[in-house]
Image (cartoon, rainbow, N blue to C red):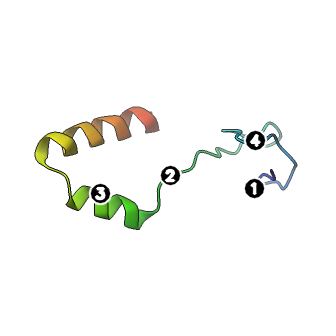
């Protein structure tokens, strides 16, 4: 796999580039998030937001 930032070859599935430090974590497309949010009840929404904050640090 190639780093989108520095174009160096890195290991498939890497979360960070070992050359430039680019964060390679994949976030869902905006449309997927919008559809998911619209279909959630309050309980699911609260947990989704909590998980999102935990993931993003």
Mark 4–mark 1 CB contact (< 8 Å): yes
Rounded to the nearest angstrom, the CA distance separating label 4 from label 1 is 9 Å
Reading the image, the residue beneath label 3 is: 36
Report the quarter where the C terminus lies: top left
Q: In this view, does 2 lie above or below 31?
A: above
- Rendered image quadrant of residue 22: top right
Determine the residue located farthest toward the left in the rendered image: 42
Ranked by sequence position, the earlier of labels 3 and 1 is 1
Rounded to the nearest angstrom, the CA distance separating label 2 from label 4 is 16 Å
Q: For the residue labelled by badge 1, is the local secondary structure a helix, a strand or a loop?
A: loop
Image location (x, y in percent) of residue 6 = 82, 54
Image location (x, y in percent) of residue 2 = 81, 53
Can you tell which of label 3 and label 4 is closer to the viewer? 3
- Residue drawn at x 65%, y 46% is 24
Reading the image, the residue beneath label 2 is: 27
Reading the image, the residue beneath label 4 is: 17
1 horizontally vs 31: left or right? right
Q: For the residue labelled by badge 2, is the local secondary structure a helix, a strand or a loop?
A: loop
Can you tell which of label 2 and label 1 is closer to the viewer? 2
């Amino acid at each position: 796999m190639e780093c989108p930032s520095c174009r160096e070859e890195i290991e498939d599935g890497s979360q960070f580039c070992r050359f430039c430090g680019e964060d390679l974590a994949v976030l869902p497309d905006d449309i997927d998030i919008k559809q998911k949010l619209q279909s959630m009840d309050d309980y699911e929404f609260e947990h989704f937001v909590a998980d999102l904050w935990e993931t993003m640090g």
